[in-house]
Image (tube, helix red, strand yellow):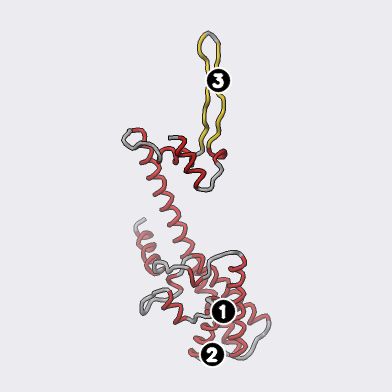
Amino acid sequence: MTEKARIACFNSGQRVDDHFVAIDDMIEVGKGAKRPVKTVLMSRYACYLVIQNADPAKEIVALGQTYFAVQTRRQELSDQDIEVKRRLTIRAELRTHNSHLADAAKDAGVIAPIDYAIFQNHGYMGLYGGLNAQDIHRHKGLKKGQQILDHMGSTELAANLFRATQAEEKLRREKIVGKAKANAAHREVRAKVRQTIKELGGTMPDALPPAESIKQLESRQKRLGKGK
């Protein structure tokens, strides 16, 4: 049982000695005498591997497997809850900063709705490797009426939030005037954000899968809030 667990540990790329530590434990055998007994101290991960490689027909093994299944599910639910909170928080911030960016773009001369749409597309193309909003919508498999930003996970939202804050700063700091210059600045900022993600070994935004509609999450949170 333990040997199978050791092999699984090794094959998963873990250091076996970090999870299975053999020691000589001294135990009393009567009249004050002691003798060494081989003992293996195991990490939680090692215990998991042992129980997963044991015979489930034995009651103690079945109980152990049930325990780890329950704990794994609890962790999954906890991780999901953290992701939901991150998405809701970043999406709210992004709404605010996109509004600030729109004001900065307007000051630069991007006034008409069609001009602002073009301005936004230049930003998307910089961050998404040449894909405009329509391309991203199609690439992500979104349906008609679904908004790109509403289906971004926290990582993708964070990249877009950084883009929005830095683009606004650049427009205001450099006092950029003119639609063409504003578009170029927006695309440049987003392209640098994409380059940073690449240098850090991150996943490109266009490679990230679409997430559940954030509107549904917001609606769910409101219902839960009313139920308290």
Callout 1 amino acid: Gly
Task: Give the residue at mark 3.
Answer: 36
Q: Is residue 152 left or right of residue 176?
A: left
Residue indicated by mark 2: 111
Mark pair 1, 3: CA separation: 67 Å
Pair 1/3: label in front:
3
In which image quadrant can residue 175 be found? bottom right
Q: Are marks 1 and 3 in contact (CB under 8 Å)?
A: no
* Residue 135 image-quadrant placement: bottom left
Q: Where is residue 179 in the image (x, y as percent from the top left)?
A: 58, 90
Residue designated by label 1: 126
Residue 8's label in the rendered image is none
N-terminal-most mark, 2 or 1: 2
Q: In which quarter of the image is the C terminus?
A: bottom left
- Residue in the picture at 58% in, 71% down: 162
Residue neighbourhood size for the residue with mark 1, other residues' Cα within 10 Å, grouped as few (<14), some (14–19), many (≥20): many
